[in-house]
Image (spheres, grey):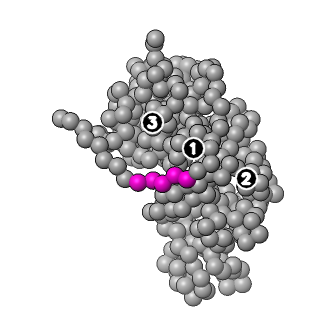
Amino acid sequence: MDKTNILITGTGSLIGQAVIKSINKSGIADRVRLIGCDYFPDTVGSFWCESNHLLPDLLKAEEEENWKAKIYEIVEKENIKVVFIGVDFELLYFADIKEDLYERFGCMVIVSDRKVIETGNDKYLTYQFLKENGINAPDTILLDEWNKEEIFLPCIIKPRNGARSRGVELIKDTDTLRNRKDALSGQGFIIQKAIGTMKSEYTCGILYWNGKYADSIILRRTLKEGNTAFAEFCGNTEEKIVSYIRKIGDALTPFGSCNLQLRCDSEGDPYLFEINPRFSGTTYMRALFGYNEVEYVISRALGWDVPDLAPKPGRIYRFYDERLVES
């Protein structure tokens, strides 16, 4: 039986590897051939693919056209039919070429539209999006516009554009806030009201296809070094969160999987603090629960029978692992 070729970018990233592992755990693993690419050779994920390509450095402006040409070359040469993106900074570039790749090669890139990505990438735009759509949002202001009369403590200072808790600080008093404003002025930071605690933090997945809601999953989680170290699925029994993320999804209408991070206040009301308009680092955790969104997306994209997403309650712990690659 001929296999269908799937491209996964970021074979060195947590997201790219989560996509690969989800495919290998799926019921369609024997029907697909995995092709990888990254910006570094010998990534762990590259050893899980049948071939791996090295990409030009997209973070260098002069390499953008070379990067684009390489992607087109891989898609055509390898007869790629579905592309999964494992690197955040690639999202906008793929959003700009996804229609052309489909028209020229029949290759579907699993990426949301530019507006969705821009809203998720900028945490202040995320706040404005929530407010405009009448959805709960933690009070948020630009750090450069803060004054002593406008304050909500405790608060969080963090970059407008950032991920994995980089640059995030919890501030409990006005003097510290003033000092941090002086140090970070002009660098694109926001101040956001601190909601709840780590015990009330959730990472949620919403799945949309062609503008319509397909499914969702809610995981209570604990972070370690910016990534989920522990996740618990309770059967989507958190009714307020179920309703809340559906409102966000219907207003945002992403394509494929979209990750929402939120906390609940003392009343149990959810407040979103981050949108990741892509698959999540917890993608494989979700697959272990029985929510294999990667298999679902591939099946929808290729017109195959769509699997049920029927996760079972439980807990998952993330840990380091090692693997020998013989010379």
Where's residue 281, x and y in %? Answer: 50, 48
**Helix, strand or loop status at disc 3:** helix
- For badge 1, the amino acid type reads Phe
- Marks counted in the figure total 3
Residue 253 relative to residue 81: left or right: right
Q: Nearer the viewer, mark 3 or mark 1?
A: 1
Give the crowd class for mark 3: few <14, some 14-19, many >=20 residues within 10 Å.
many
Quadrant location, the C terminus = top left
Q: Which residue is mark 1?
A: 289
Identify residue type, mark 2.
Thr
Q: Which residue position holds label 2?
A: 237
Q: Looking at the image, is mark 2 or mark 3 earlier in the sequence?
A: 3
- Residue 20 numbered tag: 3
**Which residue extends farthest bottom?**
175
Q: Dot 1 lies on which element?
A: helix
Q: Which residues fall within the magenta stretch? A: 315-319
Does the magenta segment cover residue 316?
A: yes
